[in-house]
Amino acid sequence: MNNNFFTKENDRYGSGSSKWDLFEANGYPQDTIPMWVADMDFPTVPEVIAEIEKLARTGIWGYTYASDAYYQAVVNWQKTRHNHLIKKEDISIMPGVVTAINVAIEAFTDVGDYVLIQEPVYHPFRIQIENLGRQAISADLIENQGQYKMDLATLEEMIVKHNIKLMLFCNPHNPVGRVYTRDELIDLSEILLKYNVLVVSDEIHGDLILPGYKHIPYATLSSETANQCITCTAPSKTFNLAGLTTSNIIIENTELKERFDRVAQKRALPALSPFGLKACETAYNCGAYWLDQLRTFIASQYQISKIFVETNQLPIKITPLEGTYLMWLDFRALTNNPDSIEAAGKNVGLWLNNGKIFGDSGRGFMRLNLACTEKTLNQGLVKITKMVEELAKTK
């Protein structure tokens, strides 16, 4: 492993970083360790940096288009990494996955319709549904001793009762870190196909899988699932490119893609970014070695965290992590009050995501970002100890 990729400290203060430059605005002290929003503290793939620098030096960044080479890079990546066989015509390029989810909700549901989710889940799901005048309804994941699984019985009841047309699905799951097995996905698909429910599958973390697990795109289960699925992918989480606003939405059903694209075109979305296109193409063509080292590093960060919690006998639980670089921490042995946990974090200078934003079933949990240096992680773990001490005083 090239340790320089993931061990070098990078000073992000004053860089316009949402993660590092908004402490005071959110009530945190200046010495806070930020381990919340899902971006990494590492520079991206060296080949991507070189190509972006080359493009920047031209000084001309006019309107652009996605070349055949760009599409081929996306097609090849999906085939080699996920055995997802797609073609250029299946891809709609969007500024981001959340934008794509918004477009899909408008394209395939009506105002007042129920849209199905599975909380605790990425909070923009509910926000986008409700912003568009639809109703979010959740078949909450079942949690038992830290293990999460889908509640398919409740899910089917909700589909029937509320005439569900659309489900927003998250795999790998943010925030609980599940990577669903083929059998689990097949069981889900049988219900969704039975009732003709369209699936928007958010697979933005699909490249970030820990050793021993495998991401299976929902659309690859069968020709039927491919025909009833909108797969949301992006290089942003994988290669730390979120600021370059480029995502690839895969829609293999021609009719669905035409409807999706019509709504997107009405939105007057931003023009494609030459930097985003170049970064995505280069990352997919050259970045596999970097990603494989990142996955090993994230697995190490997870193990360090588990050992720390066990060694110090902290009364919190770490949910088993199968994918993403986001660790789901259970503080419920100390308190079920999410505001008390967040307040403790502010007092000790540790910024985590409050689990309540992911739905009511996230209350008592916090989400921690492992995509930082080991030094930063250790500093954060020490602050968690201080959080625990503070919460124990008020228990």
Image (cartoon, grey):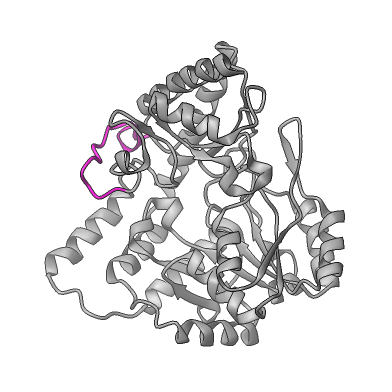
Residue 151 is left or right of residue 378, and the answer is right
Residue 213 lies, with reference to residue 229, above or below; the image says above
Dominant secondary structure, magenta: loop
Q: Which residue is found at the position 81% from the left and 50% from the top?
A: 151
Instruction: Pick the residue in front: 238 or 103.
Output: 103
Split into 4 quadrants, where in the image is the N terminus? top left
Residue 292 lies, with reference to residue 315, above or below; the image says below
Q: Is residue 174 visible?
A: no
Q: Residue furthest front?
A: 394
Where is residue 131 shown, x and y percent of the image? Answer: 55, 69
Displayed quadrant of residue 166: bottom right
Residue 278 is left or right of residue 84, and the answer is left
Residue 4 is left or right of residue 268, and the answer is left
- Let me know if residue 16 is in the magenta part: yes
Residue 7 is left or right of residue 50, and the answer is right
Q: Which residue is found at the position 56% from the left and 11% from the top?
A: 311
Q: Is residue 207 visible?
A: yes
Split into 4 quadrants, where in the image is the C terminus? top right
Residue 70 lies, with reference to residue 388, above or below; the image says below
Q: Which residue is found at the position 32% from the left and 44% from the top?
A: 25
Instruction: Pick the residue in front: 308 or 303.
Output: 308
Instruction: Pick the residue in front: 11 or 161.
Output: 161
Residue 333 lies, with reference to residue 206, above or below; the image says above
Displayed quadrant of residue 259: bottom right
- Let me know if residue 124 is in the magenta part: no
Where is residue 51 shown, x and y percent of the image? Answer: 24, 60
Where is residue 289 shown, x and y percent of the image? Answer: 42, 46
**Segment tinted magenta in the rendering:** 1-17
Where is residue 186 shown, x and y percent of the image? Answer: 80, 59
